[in-house]
Image (spheres, rainbow, N blue to C red):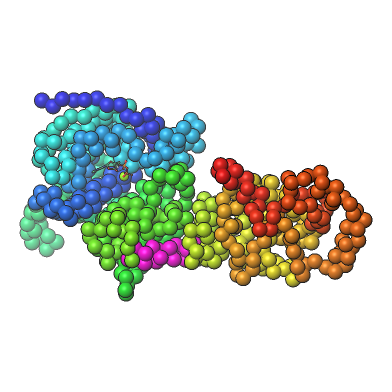
Amino acid sequence: AAQKETHGFQTEVKQLLQLMIHSLYSNKEIFLRELVSNAADAADKLRFRALENDSLYENDGELNVKLSVDKEANTVTITDNGIGMTRDEVIANLGTIAKSGTKDFFSKLSGDSAKDSQLIGQFGVGFYSAFIVADKVTVRTRAAGADASTGVEWVSDGEGEFTIAEINKPTRGTEITLHLREDEKEFADTWRLRSIVSKYSDHISIPVQMWKDEVPEREGPDGEKIEAQPGEWEVVNKATALWTREKSDITDEEYNEFYKHISHDFADPLAWAHNKVEGKTEYTSLLYIPSKAPFDMWNRDQNHGLKLYVQRVFIMDDAEQFMPTYLRFVKGLLDSNDLPLNVSREILQDNKITQALRQGCTKRVLQMLEKMAKNDSDKYQSFWNEFGNVLKEGPAEDFSNREKIAGLLRFASTHGESDAQTVSLADYIERMKEGQDKIYYVTADSLQAAKSSPHLEIFRKKGIEVLLMGERIDEWLMSHLTEFNEKQFVSIAKGNLDLGDLEDEESKKAQEEAEKEVEGVLERAKAALGDKVVDVKFTHRLTDSPAVIVADDNGMTTQMMKLMQAAGQ
Ligand code: ADP
Ligand code: MG
């Protein structure tokens, strides 16, 4: 007889289960989407592994998911013939949360369930969503290619523990049985399940099947005899890979649901671009911009990148080679006709086709953002608020697209009262004063510090707009941007600020006279400061403050120095 072992869930899993049951009561049916999505992933993984080892199919190459209902037992069962899991995989996958940064995420929860339920959207719920409708879940699984005796049964009531037992399972793959809660009996209904599948899982590329009962012999409309139809498994979804379909045939809902399937995100995406490219390189790309930044966007080892298919066969998740780092928030897939089926991460690393695909995908994303900025500035603003600081890494990383990226940047500025980053460089240039040919900006530790910079005084007086930068990344950004639209960027905190044509003759004369009046002050200041400074100069840039420290023209700005110091340089 099988030995049962009891294991405890990882603390974070317990927290997730609690949070989920409380926050998803109005959206219970998504459990089916998550389980069907996992079954489809399992089919993809098997197909990939079978490229090298055909025997994994065990003479059953028709991959599918089957849904069945037992009204009397009050159960729903989801069965797939995908890759299956070994005992160790079951314990890791259905007992812990594998995402990096998870601990951090849960430590931020407030305990206020209304607030916390907002957060769960960013997190995704996956397999554990089964417990929204079930008070007991049984998983029976066996890895493809393994012996029937290596089957595993996992059982849990979602309260904190699960049991594991060895079973004999002749068929490969995973079978998940949900023992429905007393008040969730409505899901033990074929029609209900069918409608949930067509709502959420139409785009899944393997067939989702449901049992159709036999139809007994009966009479037709003209009294003719119609023979009994035997029962059969019937396909209830479209079962065509969504990205291979014509754009015009795909609804927004289908694009949204497909996004959730491939991204494991919970919320709708903000935008997408679906393109078929033919010619020298042939590929289809479907690229999405999420609506919210993931909780682990700044985590260095978080996974990102596209899902890679080659001729419709799934190859790998998180192929980073196709997206530059500054677009790491993009989710989506790439289906190439040119890469070999046995492509590996190593081969991708140094490959001409990879480069062409990466350029193509980068172009698509930048175009999608340009279009959004042009046609829907509210939407673009919400994109910027989530991902703007990532995009700012662009000019340093992607020289060839520098000008395009610069056009997508948004800044706070001295124009208007708002602190929000809403000003584009094009806006700025349009408002430039007559005679102005530079784009002026100031960087500081915070927006507040930038706003109260003494360097701003002369610009305020003359009514010249200055871009205000108070984010950590801004200094780095500006060290890689020299001009936009042929207008040079000038930090107002640097040495001899030349206002060029903006300076008028009269005030120049007045300044010279004023300098004569206080002759000697400079020498005394220089003597007092010694070699703490390079030089002491008169300035006419200040109107209220008596003095200001400026950086050398050729040197770093004070802000950059602080950054270097902080980095231990
Ligand atoms: P995600 O799908 O985002 O990875 P889930 O919570 O949905 O997270 O699933 C956790 C893991 O459990 C999956 O990554 C997969 O490894 C495994 N898993 C879940 N369902 C199946 C299944 N039907 N067949 C094989 N493995 C599965
Ligand atoms: Mg999943």
Check the picture and name the quadrant holding the N terminus. top left
In the image, what residue occupies the spot 85% across and 47% down?
524
Residue lying at the far bottom in this picture: please name it.
Answer: 279
Q: Is residue 563 left or right of residue 502?
A: left
Residue 414, above or below 134? below
Note whether residue 175 is visible. Answer: no
Residue 196, above or below 3? below
Residue 178, above or below 428? above
In the image, what residue occupies the spot 58% across and 46% down?
564
Q: Nearer the viewer, residue 96 or 523?
A: 523
In the image, what residue occupies the spot 38% across and 63% down?
358
In percent of width and height, residue 101 lies at: 42, 39
Check the picture and name the quadrant holding the C terminus. top right
In percent of width and height, residue 41 lies at: 26, 49
Tell me which segment is drawn in magenta. Answer: 353-370
Residue 430 among magenta residues: no
Where is ligand 1, by quadrant? top left
In percent of width and height, residue 202 lies at: 29, 55
Residue lying at the far right in this picture: please name it.
Answer: 517
In the image, what residue occupies the spot 87% across and 61% down?
511
Note whether residue 543 is visible. Answer: yes
Question: In the picture, residue 434 is in which quadrant?
Answer: bottom right
Q: Nearer the viewer, residue 43 or 494?
A: 494
Question: In the picture, residue 69 is in which quadrant?
Answer: top left
Most common SS among magenta residues: helix
